Amino acid sequence: MHKKVLTEQVLYHGDVSMPKGWEIDRNDLAHHILESSFRDKDVLYSRTLSKVSDYIKEYIHLKFKLSLFENKITGEIYRPGKITLPLLNVNPIDLVNSSDYTMLYGVHVKDCMVRI
């Protein structure tokens, strides 16, 4: 008898500890997220967001041998105590081109609960 893994759910978690000199400007990131929510569009290019994204991609590649690329970048703003609708990043009609991983990064978060 042989085992074949058909599906797998993996959760990578932790703090993003950027190298010295590459610290994250959270105010700049929050500004771009706020701007995108007013325009009701995806986040446009942000140097700060690019630094975070590049660091995560390189870290995941070195640590777990996974190659990541950006499919879609959005920003959400939530009020305290707000419960969101389920966020689904899978297109059931086009599974091949759907995202395999989703990254959540909190900016100016004091207290929150993420339900996966």
Image (cartoon, helix red, strand yellow):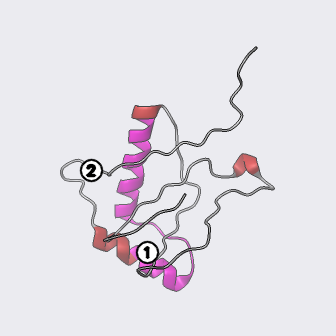
Q: Main secondary structure of the magenta part?
A: helix
Q: Is residue 108 left or right of residue 32?
A: left
Residue underneath mark 2: 18
Which quadrant of the rendered structure holds the N terminus? Answer: top right
Amino acid at pointer 1? Ile
Which residue is drawn at the image coordinates 34% and 62% (left, top)? Answer: 48
Amino acid at pointer 2? Met
Q: Residue furthest bottom?
A: 38
Residue 16 percent coordinates (x, y): 32, 51
Residue 63 percent coordinates (x, y): 40, 33
Residue underneath mark 1: 33
The magenta span reads 32-61
- The answer to whether residue 44 is magenta is yes
Which residue is drawn at the image coordinates 29% and 73% (left, top)? Answer: 27
Residue 15 percent coordinates (x, y): 32, 51
**72 or 77: nearer the viewer:** 77
- The answer to whether residue 84 is magenta is no
**94 or 79: nearer the viewer:** 79
First along the sequence among labels 2 and 1:
2
Q: Is residue 2 left or right of residue 49?
A: right
